[in-house]
Amino acid sequence: MAQIFGIMQLAQALRERKTSATELTRQALAAAKNRVDLNALITLDETGALAAAERADTALTKNPASALAGIPFAHKDIFCTNGLRTTCASRMLDNFVPPYNATVVDKLAAAQAVAIGKANMDEFAMGSSNENSFYGPVKNPWDTARVPGGSSGGSAALVAAGIVPFATGTDTGGSIRQPAAFCGITGLKPTYGRVSRFGMIAFASSLDTASVLARSAEDCAQVLAAMAGHDGRDATSADRAVDDYLAALAKPLQGLRIGVAREYFGAGIDAGVAAAVQAALKQYEKLGATLVDVSLPNAALAIPAYYVIAPAEASSNLARYDGVRYGYAAKEPKSLEDLYTRTRAEGFGAEVKRRILVGTYALSAGYYDAYYLRAQRVRRLIANDFAEAFKTVDLIAGPTTPTVAFKLGEKNSDPLAMYAEDVNTVAVNLAGLPAISLPAGFSEKLPVGLQLIAPAFEEARLLNAAHQFQLASDWHAHKPEGVA
C-alpha cells in the first residue's frame, strides 16, 4: 500500500521535532509557486502564512498543542479573511478586503493551522467544473486538460497535487463531493448547520455548507472536529454537542447496513464508474457490512428542484452587489439606474447572471407558486425519501458523479449537461444531510468517487465507514504522476 503524508503523519513529525511549522509552510508555499499551471490559488499569502507558522512553532513547544498546529492548508476564497482579499472568484469582489473573519477561519486559526492563501473557485460557488472563475479555470492535477470539478475545484486541486494536506470548501449542491471524486481525494459535506456559515459569502443560504477536503477520512475527521460547533452569530447553526469523530473511526463495520440506491445507477452513469463503485461496495461486504437495495423515488426531481431553489436564493443574496456600498462599480455612471445596470452586467460572469435571471423569474409575481413553491414541496418529498430509507439502513451509497472528470470546455456550451453532473449530489443538500465522497478506483485512468450518505448529524458514522474502507484499500493513497 502506498504511503501518504496527511495531517496525522505531519502532526506526529511536528510533535517529534522532525520538522517545524515554518519548514512545512515554506514547502507548501514553494509547491504552490511550482504548480501555478493548475491556477488553483487566487491569493498566496506568504507573509501571513510564515507569521502564522512562527506562532504555531511557539505553540508546539507547549503541551498539549492542537493536532492541527503547524499544518499548512488553504481556504476556499469564499470565506472572509480579515485584512486579506476575499474575491469569491468574481470581478465584483476583486478588491474586497473584509474587516472580519468567517467563523471557520477563526476556528482553524485558533487551532494554529497555517493558511497559505485563498483557493480558486467557480464564481460565487456557481458551477460544476471550476471554469466560471474570473481568474480563469483550475486544472485537474491528474490531467491538466480536464476540469477538477466545482465549485471547490481550487481546494481539491491543491490537496490532490500535494501542495497542502487539506483545504476548506463549501458544498451547496455537491461542490465538495464532486471535485473530491474528480481529483481522487476525500471530501466531507457535514449536516446543514453543523458548521457555522458566518462570514461565508452566501450563494443559496438554505443549502450552503462549510466543508473540508483532504486525502483521507481520518484527516477530514480531524479538521471537522476543529470546524464544527454552535455559533451564535449564525441563526442556522445547530446548538448541539459535537461528536468525538476521531474516537468513532476504529469501530468495526460488522452489522452496518448500507443501502444501495438503484436510482444512482440509472441512465447516464458511465459503465466504468458504476463498476468501480460496485467493486468498492463488495469490499464493504468483506468488512462485515450488509448491502440492501433501497429506492429514492423522487431522486429524478432533485436537479429541477435544486435549479429553481438555488438560483432563487442566489437572486436574493446577490442583490446586495449594486456598486453603491462595496465591490465593483461601473465607471462614470450617467444615472443611478445606469450604475446598477452596468455594475451588475460588468461585475458578474455569465453563469452567475444566468442563475440570477432564473431565480428572479422563479420568484416573480405569477410564477412563485408555479416554480419556487412547487420546488420546495418537491424538496420535502426528497427529504421524506431519505427518512424512509434510513428506517432500514444506516448509510446510503452510490457513485458521487455519473462520469469521471471531463475535458475543459467540453460542457460550457450546454448548461443543462453541466447541471446533470450534480445528479447524485444535490438531493443531499436539499435534505440537509451529511455525505462523503471517497476514492473508490479508476475509470479511463481517472479517479472515481464513492458517495456515502448518512442521517442528519451522523458524521461520525460516515467517517467511520470511510476510514475502515481506507484501511482495507489504498485508492486514497494514489497520486497524480509527479506528485511526491
Image: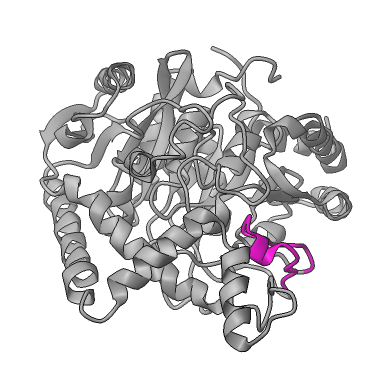
| Location of residue 310 in the rendering, given as x and y in whole percent from the top left corner | 36, 62
Query: Residue at point 19% right, 29% down?
Result: 267
377 lies left or right of 337: left
Q: Is residue 264 located in the magenta-colored stretch of the structure?
A: no
| Location of residue 291 in the rendering, given as x and y in whole percent from the top left corner | 17, 28
Query: Residue at point 62% right, 38% down?
Result: 138
Between 146 and 54, the residue placed more toward the observer is 146
448 lies left or right of 365: right
> Is 148 located above or below residue 288 in the figure?
below
Please, which residue is most extreme toward the bottom here? 336
Q: Quadrant of residue 375?
A: bottom left
402 lies left or right of 23: left
Between 45 and 458, the residue placed more toward the observer is 45
> Is 341 located above or below residue 215 in the figure?
below
Query: Residue at point 68% right, 69% down?
Result: 101
Q: Is residue 241 visible?
A: no
Quadrant containing the N terminus is top right
Principal secondary structure, stretch drawn in magenta: loop
Quadrant containing the C terminus is top right
